[in-house]
Image: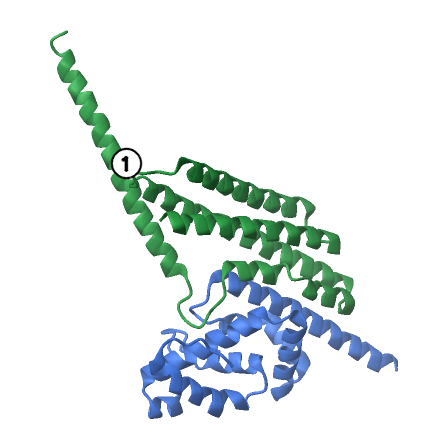
Chain colours: A blue, B green
Amino acid sequence: MSLGVKNVEIEPAVRDLRNRTLARLPGDVSRLVYLASSRDLNTGRYSHDGIAFHFSENVASKAMAACHAEIFDRLVYCSLEELIEELQSYISSTAERPGDVLQSWKRLGSYRVTIPSECDEMAAEIFLSNVKIALAILQARQESAFQDGQFA
Amino acid sequence: MSQLLPYLGVASLLLVVSALWARQLFLTRKSRIELIVSQKREPTSGSSASHRDHGERIFDLGDWDFVSRNAPSEIQEMFLRERAILAISWLRRTRARISLVMRAHVAAVGQIADLHLVTELKLALNYLVVLTLCDLLIAWIWLRGPVRTRKMVGQTLRTMSWLRGAFEQLMARVSAEI
């Protein structure tokens, strides 16, 4: 995994974050949701007690921002097919019913808050558009599976 | 009245010189501001994406192949509509970016003594071609509505490839001049 982090100061924190926290999560969408939910929406700063304890709050926040940007870039440039698999993997990892998660994501547009603050507008537009299509495909698949189950 | 004529002449001359000097100052300042603004807009961490990459992503045929094989017709239409919106947005941004670079170049050229007229003419022509292409492509996508066929996507891709080449040439020339 190459992050392209130029700041030497945060590299150990980034490694730590990848190996101890992000590697345990199932897929990039899960990682994206985790990182976005660790961000304070008022200040834009990320918090991670473990990393902050070993390094500093500032380094932890920067490391998380760098990982967030990297994962977001991967999801913007992955194919629609891969994005659907990633979303499916994330939905399966939650304790909720897949139909409810899909409905909530579509209705509330929850995925909008997963965009990193330092990304350009075009990348954000591509991501939002692709997630919208991916959710529609997943919902169509689910409805089709439900109908098949009813008529079987 | 005739005694006033020399004074009026000198005053007019001074006015013209002042206007030219003010214009030069304005253009220089504007180009500096624009360059600073464009630098600030670049992503600062993690993101390695460029505008060219965005174009490739938007016009990627792989996604259309997947959607056309695996999704019902209403989702196929949704996909084509979404991609048309993204394509127009990207073209508008590309156009604005090229215009910004060109304006900065024009401002910088005003301070160069030994101007290469042929290079400047080629650059201006290239600039006009790229802008026209962007406008034509935007109009084309607007008029045709959502992209419906693989052929149309293919045509768009070829046009975008041409546009990208022209844009790269323009950028190389501008940076060489500045």
Image position of B93 with respect to A10: above or below: above
Q: Quadrant of residue B40?
A: bottom left
Quarter of the N terminus of chain B within the rendering: top left
Q: Give x and y (percent) for residue A133.
A: 65, 67
Q: Residue at x 53, y 82 (%)?
A: A31
Image position of A78 with respect to A8: above or below: above
Badge 1: how crowded within 10 Å, few (<14), some, or many (20+)? few
Q: Residue at x 64, y 44 (%)?
A: B140
Q: Residue at x 63, y 78 (%)?
A: A87
Q: Amino acid at mark 1?
A: Arg
Left or right for A48, reference A112: left
Q: Quadrant of residue A148?
A: bottom right
Q: Residue at x 39, y 83 (%)?
A: A11
Which chain's residue wears label 1?
B
Left or right for B42, reference B10: right
Spot the residue most to the top: B2
Q: Nearer the viewer, residue A36 or B66?
A: B66
Q: For residue A109, say whether it is visible.
A: no
Spot the residue most to the right: A152
Image position of A73 with respect to B15: above or below: below
Q: Give x and y (percent) for residue A2.
A: 49, 79
Residue bearing mark 1: B23
Q: Give x and y (percent) for residue A49.
A: 38, 90
Q: For residue B114, say whether it is visible.
A: yes
Image position of B41 with respect to B1: above or below: below
